[in-house]
């Protein structure tokens, strides 16, 4: 019976196999060698996707660009196979049209060089970089000083600041003494006006200046809008009221505009009989190139270190560096101020390479790299721990860094800054020609700026 059953099962198995059914598993005998199975072929490694990280920089020295292209970019490309870094050099001339084009098109450089006041202007179009550059992602962020605030919008990082370039008051102590001014850099409005009258010299033969007591940014007009802001902030002035509207109708604003007119008239005389401006000269307006050039320049200069003499010039033994002191007798909230400009690199929100952009910024903003970047320009690094080497080796930069740390006020948070600068320059131009009074100038700025803000 068992034999018949076995035979029937075998026949059924054969029939099933013939019909494509499952074949029963049969354990191999120990004598049968296992058949070698060829290994599965491994697909070739996929080459990294080619990506171009685009960076747009404005008006840097050739040394800076050379360093970035020869040191930072090759190191970054080596660490990120398939990635190419492309730097485009632009200019501050026409920047607003260029940047507006990028953001309107939603396409352009991944990283864009912006100025101090542009965080509010373009903030909505910039990426939130906190996930990439915040403390949790990059502990080095703790080493950045006050300049970091210029790289934020609505409390979120949008990039990183490169340098701090404050505006100081540089004065020739020897020319002060020669003119009989013995009390040092003026520290209130009345002293400045007296100083302008006493230390300005006029060439009667040409009816033009041969020595200007103070050159505040622009020697010819003495009415630059950034100079106005520095004076205004030194009085404790706030650019906006609590409700967000402009504050050009404040007592501090009126005093600032009146001071600018007083300084202009003390230097050039009334508009109806104004003398001609200083003759053009090479180098810094407070430098002396030779014995014949001593009267062809300014006694004091209110500007950033860019406009001051080169650090290796011997004239530095006769130059003081101070903040602008305001007018404490008339405005109790006055304070010494150096208006700090901080160029920075922002990441556009349209960028498809935000992580790569953050990684490049981290490499270009290490302690050593931020120091080297600024050394190529003779400026103060935005990172506090990078303010070593050439900074501390230079008596001038060391003092400037200390003053910036103590008295720095950021040139940031200005709404529609390009429009405001145009509005202010137009109004201040009418101030120095005396077409408008200081009160009328401020009213004009207030009205036109309100309109520009849609208020």
Image (spheres, helix red, strand yellow):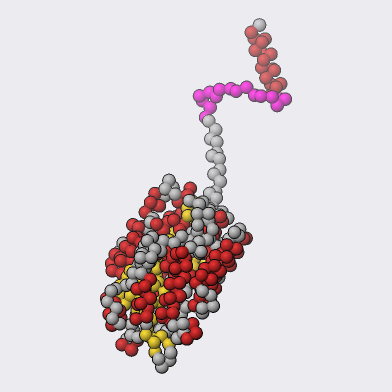
Whether the magenta-drawn stretch holds residue 30 is answered as yes
Closest to the observer, 155 or 110: 155
Closest to the observer, 420 or 115: 420
Whether the magenta-drawn stretch holds residue 25 is answered as yes
Q: Position of residue 443 (x, y in %)?
A: 54, 67
Closest to the observer, 221 or 394: 221
- Looking at the rendering, in which quadrant would you find the C terminus? bottom right
Q: Is residue 120 left or right of residue 295?
A: right
Q: Main secondary structure of the magenta part?
A: loop
Q: Residue at x 70, y 22 (%)?
A: 16
Q: Position of residue 302 (x, y in %)?
A: 39, 72
Q: Position of residue 157 (x, y in %)?
A: 47, 53
Q: Residue at x 45, y 86 (%)?
A: 275
Q: Residue at x 33, y 69 (%)?
A: 187
- Residue range (magenta): 18-33
- Most extreme residue toward the bottom is 205
- Most extreme residue toward the right is 19
- Looking at the rendering, in which quadrant would you find the N terminus? top right
Q: Is residue 199 above or below residue 393?
A: below
Q: Is residue 23 above or below residue 108?
A: above
Q: Residue at x 31, y 77 (%)?
A: 172
- Residue 95, picture quadrant: bottom right
Can residue 173 be spotted in the picture? yes
- Residue 266, picture quadrant: bottom left
- Residue 342, picture quadrant: bottom left
């Amino acid at each position: 019976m068992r034999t018949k059953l076995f035979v029937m099962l075998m026949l059924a198995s054969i029939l099933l196999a013939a019909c494509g059914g499952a074949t029963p598993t049969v354990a191999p005998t120990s004598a049968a060698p296992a058949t070698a199975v060829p290994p599965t072929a491994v697909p070739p490694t996929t080459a990294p996707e080619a990506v171009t990280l685009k960076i747009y920089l404005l008006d840097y020295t050739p040394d800076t660009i050379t360093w970035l292209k020869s040191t930072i970019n090759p190191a970054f490309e080596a660490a990120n196979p398939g990635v190419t870094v492309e730097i485009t050099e632009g200019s501050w001339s026409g920047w607003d049209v260029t940047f507006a084009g990028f953001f309107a098109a939603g396409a352009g450089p991944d990283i864009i060089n912006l100025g101090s006041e542009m965080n509010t202007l373009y903030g909505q179009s910039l990426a939130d970089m906190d996930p990439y550059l915040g403390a949790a992602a990059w502990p080095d962020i703790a080493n950045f000083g006050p300049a970091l605030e210029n790289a934020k919008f609505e409390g979120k990082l949008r990039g990183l600041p490169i340098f701090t370039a404050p505006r100081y008051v540089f004065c020739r102590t020897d020319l002060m003494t020669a003119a009989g001014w013995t009390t040092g850099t003026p520290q209130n409005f009345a002293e400045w006006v007296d100083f302008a009258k006493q230390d300005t010299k006029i060439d009667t033969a040409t009816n033009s200046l041969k020595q200007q007591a103070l050159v505040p940014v622009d020697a010819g007009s003495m009415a630059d809008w950034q100079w106005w802001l520095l004076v205004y902030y030194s009085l404790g002035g706030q650019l906006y009221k609590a409700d967000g509207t402009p504050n050009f109708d404040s007592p501090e604003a009126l005093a600032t505009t009146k001071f600018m007119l007083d300084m202009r008239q003390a230097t050039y005389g009334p508009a109806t009989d104004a003398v001609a401006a200083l003759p053009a000269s090479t180098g810094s307006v407070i430098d002396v190139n030779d014995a014949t050039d001593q009267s062809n320049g300014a006694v004091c200069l209110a500007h950033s270190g860019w406009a001051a003499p080169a650090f290796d010039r011997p004239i530095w033994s006769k130059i003081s560096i101070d903040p602008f002191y305001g007018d404490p007798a008339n405005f109790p909230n006055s304070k010494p101020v150096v208006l700090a400009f901080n160029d920075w690199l922002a990441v556009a929100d349209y960028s498809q390479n935000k992580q790569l952009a953050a990684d490049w910024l981290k490499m270009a903003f290490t302690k050593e790299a931020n120091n080297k970047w600024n050394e190529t320009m003779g400026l103060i690094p935005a990172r506090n721990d990078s303010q070593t080497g050439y900074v501390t080796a230079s008596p001038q930069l060391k003092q400037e860094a200390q003053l910036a740390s103590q008295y720095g006020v950021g040139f940031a948070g200005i709404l529609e800054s390009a429009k405001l600068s145009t509005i202010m320059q137009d109004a201040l131009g009418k101030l120095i020609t005396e077409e408008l009074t200081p009160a009328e100038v401020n009213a004009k700025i207030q009205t036109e700026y309100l309109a520009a803000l849609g208020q």
